[in-house]
Image (cartoon, grey):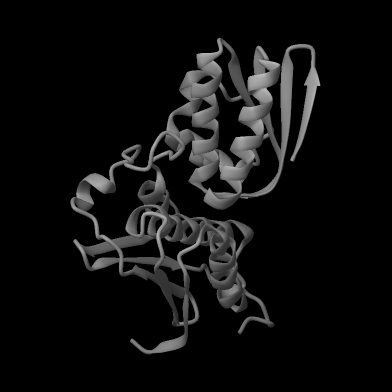
Amino acid sequence: MEIKHEGRVMTVMLTGELDHHTCSKIRQKIDSCAESERPALLCLDFSGVQFMDSSGVGLVMGRYRQMSLIGGRVQVVNVPDNMERMFVMSGLPALGVMK
Amino acid sequence: MNSQNEMNLSFDAKSINEGFARSAVAAFILPLDPTIVELSDIKTAVSEAVTNCIVHAYGYSEGTIYINVKIQDNSRVIIRIRDKGCGIENVKKAMEPLYTTGGEERAGLGFAVMQSFMDRVRVRSAQGKGTTVTMEKAIIRRASPDRA
């Protein structure tokens, strides 16, 4: 995972497998970084994700709530086709977070 | 119906084993020559069921997760994932999409994903005794001379 900052945009390049085990570590890193940088937009880039279960959706939902608390937004980009189904099931696209 | 191939696995209910569990099941069914989507669906469903055991059944405390996989007729995969944890009070409620008792970081999609990604899901649970999730999926036969 790599975190980049450009202006008030914080981009997280997610990689590998997103499950309950890996997401807890990723969440801590993102939250601690977002707390200090206070970005206006948190961009979660899924292009490097090879596997994801619903913990990946939970990760996005949790960050959506966290960013709302500091007045920021979340955007999810480059979700591989086979993982999109899970986001649709969660209702997240209706919140306007999917690009 | 005769079982043509079968494997059993038991391991500690620790989150670090989630990847191992889904990879082991995937490796076992690989001789059926599943498509990438079929394999991904099964790995995802296994990951959901195993996570439920760790988060809900054992509540992050010590326990053992048991997986049994049967391959029938060289195409039907039957996966049984069992725990000896707290059991589910209301199975119907637990299976509702977006329902979770796991806190804000859980999507509440575990059972919905299992049902959507597999052909059939059955849940048997007894409070204080444990839960067994049985999932089935047919792997579409494709013409391949190498197929087991």
Residue B58: x and y in percent read: 36, 60
Residue A31: x and y in percent read: 61, 29
Residue A9: x and y in percent read: 73, 16
Q: Residue at x 22, y 53 (%)?
A: B91
Q: Residue at x 28, y 42 (%)?
A: B96
Task: Report the front residue among B20 and A87.
Answer: B20
Q: What quarter of the picture does the N terminus of chain B occupy?
A: bottom left
Q: What quarter of the picture does the C terminus of chain B occupy?
A: bottom right
| Relative to A36, B134 lies left or right | left
Q: Residue at x 72, y 22 (%)?
A: A10
Q: Is residue B28 above or below residue A11?
A: below
Q: How many marks?
A: 0
| Relative to A44, A85 lies left or right | left
Residue A77: x and y in percent read: 67, 29
Task: Report the front residue among A62 and A34.
Answer: A34
| Relative to B16, B122 lies left or right | left
